[in-house]
Image: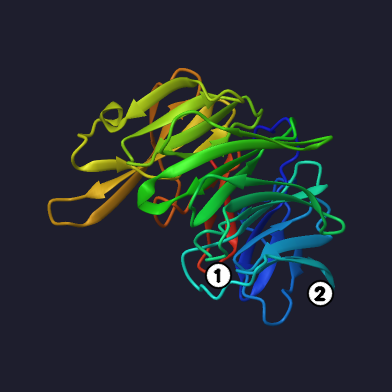
């Protein structure tokens, strides 16, 4: 398989109550076995999770905390999302490790949690759990998708506001705090960053088209509506799924219903530079969302056990 410019970071899955971390730097394919497993602190209900590149620590969020643990099960630090929220639904804090592993980026959906304050985006010291920088956001989000740029130190955040759409932000740490930029244009759902970090992919919140943008300014290089794939606008939508199969190819997922009201989905390959539709792609996925392209020519689906399956076109 083709190699990406930088080693792939590990990926994590929550399987049987444990955070399983998988090493993607090897060429292993098929059902992946975890390189390390992490046991959450008893009583913690894990919402989101990530693992360090050396697989020695994992960070996860609950509805009211961000927690760092070792593979031996020791709690390294805990940062409370204060004030405590009794809301059980509608807010899912997100976490992601920076490319250099020094910061944990945390999206706090504080409005929906009923904390009486704006949503926040916070960068924590990965070693100590202390605040490096924070910023208030003008959003009322349920959750957030964070994508870490491979080289620039930037992180992209897509705040999902339910039926009100989504908002994409970009941030980086500076000597004085956080540089925060809200990307132009509303209602674009962030899907993936290109392996070289020069572009990113979005899908219209209304699911009418897919677009590729330049990084960091967000200028659209091309956009494809569903008719580009041979379908009409009324019966087919672009799913909030897909990503970069390799630096030059993106995977786009479409879905709809038959006349008998049976749901269907299909993945397509598109030239990431020109926007030319290359054809149907058999991802061996359970549904439109059971795919995570890795950018090196391989992608992940899910085994019935809950562990990822790494596949290649070969």
Q: What residue is at 47 percent from the left and 54 percent from the top?
A: 290
Tell me what residue is drawn at x 58 percent, y 23 percent. Answer: 217
Q: Position of residue 237 (x, y in %)?
A: 29, 42
- Choose top left, top right, bottom left or bottom right for residue 185: top left
Relative to residue 55, is residue 180 drawn left or right?
Answer: left
From the viewer's perspective, is 149 left or right of 129?
left
At horizontal 84% and vertical 60% (from top left) the residue drawn is 56
**208 or 265, nearer to the observer:** 208
* Tag 1 residue: 305
The residue singled out by tag 2 in the image is: 73
Q: How many marks?
A: 2
* Pointer 1 local density, CA inside 10 Å: few below 14, some 14–19, many at least 20: few
- Which numbered mark, 2 or 1, is in the foreground of this view? 2
For this view, does 301 lie left or right of residue 186? right
**Sequence-first disc among 2 and 1:** 2
The residue under the point 22% across, 35% down is 233
Along the line of sight, which residue is nearer the eye, 112 or 29?
A: 112
Image quadrant of residue 166?
top left
Residue 291 placed where, x, y %? 49, 49
Element type at mark 2 = loop
Q: Quadrant of the C terminus?
A: top right
As helix, strand or loop, the secondary structure at mark 1 comes to loop
Q: Is residue 264 above or below residue 17?
A: above
Residue 297 visible at all: no
Seen in the picture, residue 186 relative to 261 is either above or below; the reply is above
Height in image: 32 above or below 249? below
Q: Quadrant of the N terminus?
A: top right
In this image, 232 relative to 4: left or right? left
**Residue 144 visible from this viewpoint:** yes
Image position of 248 with respect to 281: above or below:
above
- Asked if disc 2 and disc 1 are in contact, CB closer than 8 Å, the reply is no
Residue 126 in percent (x, y) is at: 82, 54
């Amino acid at each position: 398989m083709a190699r990406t410019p930088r080693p792939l970071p590990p990926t994590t899955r929550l399987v049987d109550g444990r955070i399983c971390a998988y090493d993607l730097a090897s060429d292993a394919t098929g059902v992946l076995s975890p390189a390390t497993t992490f046991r959450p602190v008893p009583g913690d209900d894990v919402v989101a999770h990530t693992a360090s590149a050396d697989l020695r620590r994992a960070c996860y969020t609950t509805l009211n905390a961000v927690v760092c643990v070792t593979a031996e099960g020791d709690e390294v630090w805990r940062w409370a999302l204060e004030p405590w929220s009794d809301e059980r639904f509608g807010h899912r804090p997100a976490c992601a490790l920076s490319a250099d592993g020094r910061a944990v980026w945390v999206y706090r959906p504080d409005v929906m949690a009923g904390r009486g304050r704006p949503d926040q985006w916070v960068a924590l010291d990965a070693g100590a759990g202390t605040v490096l920088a924070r910023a208030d956001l003008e959003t009322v989000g349920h959750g957030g998708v964070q994508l870490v740029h491979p080289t620039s130190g930037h992180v992209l955040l897509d705040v999902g506001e339910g039926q009100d759409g989504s908002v994409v932000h970009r941030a980086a740490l500076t000597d004085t705090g956080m540089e925060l930029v809200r990307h132009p244009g509303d209602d674009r759902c962030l899907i993936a960053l290109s392996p070289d970090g020069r572009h990113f992919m979005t899908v219209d919140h209304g699911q009418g088209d897919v677009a590729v943008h330049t990084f960091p300014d967000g200028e659209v290089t091309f956009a494809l509506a569903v008719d580009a794939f041979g379908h009409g606008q009324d019966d087919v939508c672009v799913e909030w799924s897909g990503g970069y199969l390799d630096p030059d190819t993106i995977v786009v997922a479409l879905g709809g219903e038959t006349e008998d009201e049976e749901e269907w989905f299909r993945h397509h390959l598109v030239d990431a530079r020109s926007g030319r539709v290359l054809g149907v792609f058999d991802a061996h996925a359970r549904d439109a969302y059971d795919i995570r392209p890795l950018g090196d020519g391989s992608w992940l689906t899910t085994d019935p056990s809950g562990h990822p399956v790494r596949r290649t076109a070969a």
